Image (cartoon, grey):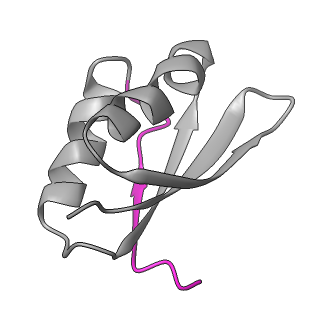
Amino acid sequence: MTVLQLVDVSTDTCPMTFVRARLRLDRMLAGEILEIRFKGDEPRQNLHRSLAEQGHAILLMEFEEDKTGRLLVRKGG
Protein backbone atom coordinates (compact mmCIF):
# COMPACT_ATOMS: atom_id res chain seq x y z
CA MET A 1 0.00 0.00 0.00
CA THR A 2 1.54 3.26 -1.12
CA VAL A 3 0.58 6.49 0.59
CA LEU A 4 0.35 9.13 -2.09
CA GLN A 5 -0.29 12.22 0.00
CA LEU A 6 0.01 13.38 3.59
CA VAL A 7 -1.89 16.02 5.51
CA ASP A 8 -0.98 16.97 9.08
CA VAL A 9 -3.92 18.43 10.99
CA SER A 10 -2.36 17.94 14.41
CA THR A 11 -2.33 21.69 15.13
CA ASP A 12 -5.93 22.19 13.99
CA THR A 13 -9.17 21.86 15.93
CA CYS A 14 -12.51 20.50 14.76
CA PRO A 15 -14.09 21.20 12.37
CA MET A 16 -10.89 22.28 10.59
CA THR A 17 -9.36 18.80 10.95
CA PHE A 18 -12.16 17.43 8.75
CA VAL A 19 -12.18 20.43 6.40
CA ARG A 20 -8.46 20.20 5.66
CA ALA A 21 -8.61 16.42 5.18
CA ARG A 22 -11.61 16.73 2.87
CA LEU A 23 -9.98 19.48 0.81
CA ARG A 24 -6.95 17.28 0.25
CA LEU A 25 -9.11 14.29 -0.68
CA ASP A 26 -11.07 16.45 -3.11
CA ARG A 27 -7.85 17.02 -5.09
CA MET A 28 -7.05 13.30 -5.27
CA LEU A 29 -8.24 10.59 -7.66
CA ALA A 30 -10.56 7.80 -6.54
CA GLY A 31 -8.57 4.94 -5.04
CA GLU A 32 -5.58 7.05 -4.00
CA ILE A 33 -4.46 6.87 -0.38
CA LEU A 34 -4.08 9.78 2.02
CA GLU A 35 -2.29 9.67 5.37
CA ILE A 36 -3.79 12.03 7.93
CA ARG A 37 -1.89 12.85 11.12
CA PHE A 38 -3.87 14.34 13.98
CA LYS A 39 -3.78 15.06 17.70
CA GLY A 40 -6.51 15.16 20.33
CA ASP A 41 -9.65 13.38 21.43
CA GLU A 42 -12.12 15.08 19.11
CA PRO A 43 -10.44 14.13 15.80
CA ARG A 44 -9.72 10.68 17.25
CA GLN A 45 -13.43 10.13 17.81
CA ASN A 46 -14.91 11.96 14.82
CA LEU A 47 -12.52 12.25 11.88
CA HIS A 48 -12.72 8.65 10.67
CA ARG A 49 -16.50 8.59 11.06
CA SER A 50 -16.97 11.80 9.06
CA LEU A 51 -14.69 10.61 6.26
CA ALA A 52 -16.44 7.23 6.08
CA GLU A 53 -19.80 9.03 5.82
CA GLN A 54 -18.37 10.86 2.79
CA GLY A 55 -17.73 7.51 1.08
CA HIS A 56 -14.03 7.07 1.83
CA ALA A 57 -12.54 3.82 3.14
CA ILE A 58 -10.61 3.87 6.41
CA LEU A 59 -7.68 1.49 5.92
CA LEU A 60 -5.80 2.05 9.17
CA MET A 61 -6.26 3.88 12.46
CA GLU A 62 -3.33 4.13 14.88
CA PHE A 63 -3.26 5.96 18.19
CA GLU A 64 -0.37 6.79 20.51
CA GLU A 65 -0.39 7.47 24.25
CA ASP A 66 0.30 11.18 23.65
CA LYS A 67 -3.09 11.43 21.84
CA THR A 68 -1.51 11.65 18.40
CA GLY A 69 -2.69 9.33 15.68
CA ARG A 70 -2.85 8.66 12.01
CA LEU A 71 -5.42 7.49 9.54
CA LEU A 72 -4.87 5.94 6.15
CA VAL A 73 -7.83 6.71 3.92
CA ARG A 74 -8.59 5.45 0.42
CA LYS A 75 -10.53 8.03 -1.53
CA GLY A 76 -13.95 6.83 -2.57
CA GLY A 77 -15.27 7.12 -6.09
x and y percent of residue 20 in the render? 24, 41
Q: Main secondary structure of the magenta part?
A: loop
Q: Is residue 34 above or below residue 52?
A: below
Q: Residue furthest right?
A: 65
Which quadrant is the C terminus positioned in? bottom left
Instruction: Identify which residue is drawn at 23% across, 58% down.
Output: 25
x and y percent of residue 14 in the render? 35, 17
Which of 65 and 29 lies nearest the eye of the viewer?
Answer: 29
Which quadrant is the N terminus positioned in? bottom right
In the displayed structure, does residue 46 sit left or right of residue 24? Answer: right
Instruction: Identify which residue is drawn at 22% across, 57% down.
Output: 24
x and y percent of residue 63 in the render? 76, 38
User: How many numbered marks does the figure carry?
Assistant: 0
Which of 2 and 59 lies nearest the eye of the viewer?
Answer: 59
Q: Residue furthest bottom?
A: 2
Residue 6 falls within the magenta-colored stretch: yes
In which image quadrant can residue 15 be found? Answer: top left
Instruction: Identify which residue is drawn at 21% across, 34% down.
Output: 19
Q: Read off the magenta span.
A: 1-12
Residue 28 falls within the magenta-colored stretch: no
Instruction: Identify which residue is drawn at 68% across, 35% down.
Output: 68
Q: Is residue 5 above or below residue 39?
A: below
